[in-house]
Amino acid sequence: MLVTDTVILDGITTGVSTGSDPEQISRKSVLINMTSQIVPVITIDGPSGAGKGTIAQNVASELGFHILDSGSLYRLTALASLNADLDLTNESAISEIALNLPVVFKPTSSGLQILLSGKDVSETIRKEEIGMRASKVAAIPAVRDALLARQRGFLENPGLVADGRDLGTTIFPDAPLKVFMTASAEERAERRYKQLKAKGINANIAALVKDLKLRDEQDANRAVSPLKPAADAIQIDTTEMGIDEVTQMVLDLVKQRLA
Ligand code: DC
């Protein structure tokens, strides 16, 4: 499915649960295996800046569903491993960090606050360099394994909207609705540029395009769970779409698939 109009940005952080207690996670994982057919999950995958985060947030709030911003878990792992001064080659130590991330997603009146070891890192993890490191740690198979149960731990009634790269292919392969959202690299860079500008941060569009393309390449070409649409995903090109239009389109799909 190809559609047209303009969406602004992903990167609005949402999320609801820590899924951080390992015992709770393993209990939930069992529950999920038994209930994945009845707790509805909508997956939204796609490259960085395609609008996944914004749309996931809108759809979740319209449906009253929980939300999982899976990229934030990779970003947190990237930040925590950087804080621990770990080299990217130290895969076992980074996976250990991913497994035990001391993170709390705290809803506040101004959005979701992300606390890592009690410190508010909501803004820090959105930095371009953390995104790039996240893409690198995400290529480590043991990191992906470490975050698997935690991601499934977000599945709770009345339902979940989960966005990332492999939610439809690996994390929730039985999801009744899978969306794969794309947009041209130039359009995605333009959105990122406007987002940074709005925050008073200087940016260079050419550098942003270069970074996005590099990240796409890393994410799409890694051996484990690469960025790619699930066979049964509905693809939406948001290059020329508006936020409301994409949100409505996904909500219409929800009506058809989850009725
Ligand atoms: O969606 P994002 O830009 O916040 O994600 C940051 C990085 O994390 C992204 O470049 C690749 C990785 N990631 C992943 O490999 N799998 C996911 N489900 C989500 C993110």
Image: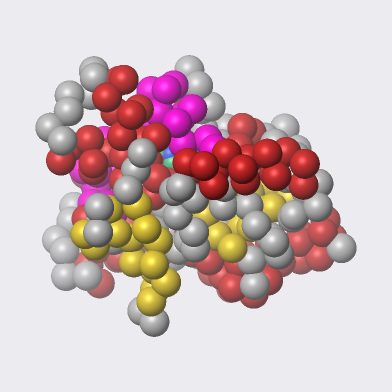
Q: Is residue 177 left or right of residue 88?
A: right
Q: Is residue 104 left or right of residue 233?
A: left
The quarter in which the C terminus is drawn is bottom right
**Residue 158 part of the magenta segment:** no
For image coordinates 22% across by 70% down, the residue present is: 199
In the rendered image, which quarter is residue 149 located in? top right
| Residue 80 percent location from the top left of the image | 23, 41
For image coordinates 75% across by 45% down, the residue present is: 36
Residue 211 in sight here: no
Dominant SS in magenta = helix
For image coordinates 46% across by 47% down, the residue present is: 21
- Which residues lie in the magenta part? 125-149
| Residue 133 percent location from the top left of the image | 26, 35
Residue sticking out furthest to the bottom? 109
| Residue 77 percent location from the top left of the image | 31, 39
Ligand 1 located in image quadrant: top left
For image coordinates 61% across by 32% down, the residue present is: 170
**Residue 136 part of the magenta segment:** yes
**Number of numbered tags placed on the structure image:** 0
Q: Is residue 247 left or right of residue 186?
A: right
